[in-house]
Image (cartoon, helix red, strand yellow):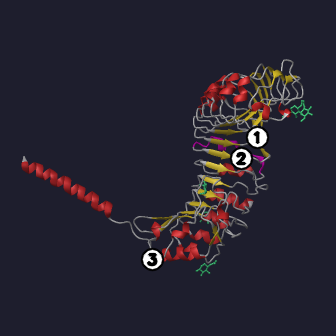
Amino acid sequence: MAKLLSFLSFLLYSQLFIMTSSASSPPALCPQDQSNALLQLKTNFSLDRQTSIFCSDAGIKTYPKTKSWKKGTDCCKWDGIQCESKTGNVIGLDLSCSWLRGSIYSNSNLFHLKHLQKLNLAHNDLQRSKILPEYVSLLSLTHLNFTFSSLDGQVPLQLSRLSRLVSLDLSFSGVSLESSVLKKIIQNLTQLRDLALDHIYLATIEPNIFANLPSSLTTLSLNQCDLKGEFPERIVSFPNLKKLVLSENGDLTGDFSKSSWSNSLQYLDIEFTNIAGKLPNAIGNLKSLQFLGISGCKFSGSIPASIGNLKDMWYLSLFRNDFSGPIPHSLSNLGQLKILALSENRLVGKIPNMFGKLTKLIGLTLGANRFTGTIPSSICEIRKLQILDLSNNTLSGTIPPCLGKLTSLESFDVSNNHLVGPIPSGKLRKFHNESYEGNPGLCGFPLSKKCNRE
Ligand SMILES: *[C@@H]1O[C@H](CO)[C@@H](O)[C@H](O)[C@H]1NC(C)=O
Ligand SMILES: *[C@@H]1O[C@H](CO)[C@@H](O)[C@H](O)[C@H]1NC(C)=O
Ligand SMILES: *[C@@H]1O[C@H](CO)[C@@H](O)[C@H](O)[C@H]1NC(C)=O
Ligand SMILES: *[C@@H]1O[C@H](CO)[C@@H](O)[C@H](O)[C@H]1NC(C)=O
Ligand SMILES: *[C@@H]1O[C@H](CO)[C@@H](O)[C@H](O)[C@H]1NC(C)=O
């Protein structure tokens, strides 16, 4: 028995020993040539906090990462560097938001980092450098990010040889992209999952070429690209699609009514396009949807009650379309909503008294519809409300006095309704009388009409 026990403890001990010894075998150090290449690269940039000014908007901390790069230390420990643990090869270089100012020329030491898989130069001032054909020597690249990096010139055709690219972000980078090059990129980069080209001029490309993106796509972002013509509807059905942004392409048409929208969708922003159609009933199945922006489009039909199933939704903006019918009461289930914008449609009926659970709302706009009935007092429970627009309807009755207690309100508009009685005391008297005009029955400050009993 004792023998057995000691054998077992020996087993246990040796097991532990193996585990600790393998855990303590140190990761390889950064190879000297790569360390040198990085140190030389560092000397090609000056530092200026201003170059990374938009990072804080994106919620990213900015600091000069290259300050930690010092000769004689292991480059794998430097800020922004990722090494492969077995070989020590530098496989990741994330210099986003690092205050860098300087150009990258074809003799740059950057191109000596042959093992790079991820390269992020976002939010620096690369002083109108070009995307050089030399980037193609970094054949292992899977992620390439130049967003907000002040580039210039044409994207070279050679970029489409980086066939391992999974993520390509050229949004707001300053580059130009020819139709033939984009075609090749889409055709050749079959691993691509994230593509962001916001603010790149694409007026001459045929939007249908995006239909050739791999169906494993997760993100496509094309805000303000001057896209013209019909967007291929099948993309909204790509099974892994999480984020689709087509906003502010006023001449982009399309109709997603008949496609089954991807169950993975979290973020759909097609605001201010010419996209038309109806919201499908099945939208209620898209349980991951958090952001639905279709303002300023050509949508019609009713708002499906099934939207009330989308419990994670925080942004629902349908304003300036042709929606008709009532507000579905089920919207009261959307407890995460911060923005609910339904103005400028043809919605009818009463405004449901449904705001008791929508306490996270900061913007509620229902103006320029055909709502009747009174202003529901449950709006007073939205303590954080900053914007309330009920103008241009046919609302009647008095303004609930409790609205005067909404101290966060910065914008308030009930003009052009059939409201009567005194304007409540408190916050509501701080607004200009334009917020109240077009209601002959309203009285009291800030209107010049006095109330009888005041
Ligand atoms: C970058 O720095 C290296 C070494 O300091 C230098 O040889 C090279 O000319 C520089 N390149 C640019 C583009 O400034
Ligand atoms: C497309 O990719 C293949 C390899 O994946 C490459 O041989 C070819 O040159 C690429 N075409 C272009 C135009 O880059
Ligand atoms: C590119 O980098 C920026 C800054 O780090 C980041 O916010 C953005 O999400 C990246 N783009 C992609 C497609 O990952
Ligand atoms: C609201 O009504 C006023 C007065 O009729 C009109 O001038 C204004 O354009 C309307 N606003 C909207 C957004 O329809
Ligand atoms: C709004 O206020 C101005 C003075 O600031 C006043 O001249 C005007 O008559 C008021 N309008 C209404 C509708 O009360």
Mark sitting earlier along the chain (1/2) = 2
Which quadrant contains ligand 4? top right
Residue that numbered label 1 is attached to: 275
Q: Is residue 139 above or below residue 375?
A: below
Image x and y of residue 275, in percent: 76, 40
- Which residue position holds label 2? 246
- Does the beta carbon at disc 3 come under 8 Å from ligand 1? no
Q: Is residue 418 left or right of residue 292?
A: right
- x then y, percent, for residue 136: 60, 68
For badge 2, the amino acid type reads: Leu
Circle 2 SS class: loop
Image quadrant of residue 276?
A: top right
Give, as a single range, the part of the protein colored magenta: 227-239
* 436 and 233: which is toward the camera: 436
In the displayed structure, does residue 358 sit left or right of residue 22? Answer: right
- The answer to whether the residue bearing label 2 lies less than 8 angstroms from the nearest atom of ligand 3 is no
Question: Badge 2: how crowded within 10 Å, few (<14), some, or many (20+)?
Answer: many
To which residue does mark 3 refer? 72
Name the front one of labels 3 and 1. 3
Per the image, is 29 magenta?
Answer: no
Residue 375: quadrant of the picture = top right
Proximity of marks 1 and 2: CB atoms separated by less than 8 Å: yes
User: How many numbered marks have been drawn onto this rendered protein structure?
Assistant: 3
Residue at (61, 61) in percent of width and height: 97
Residue 379 pos. (x, y %): 69, 26
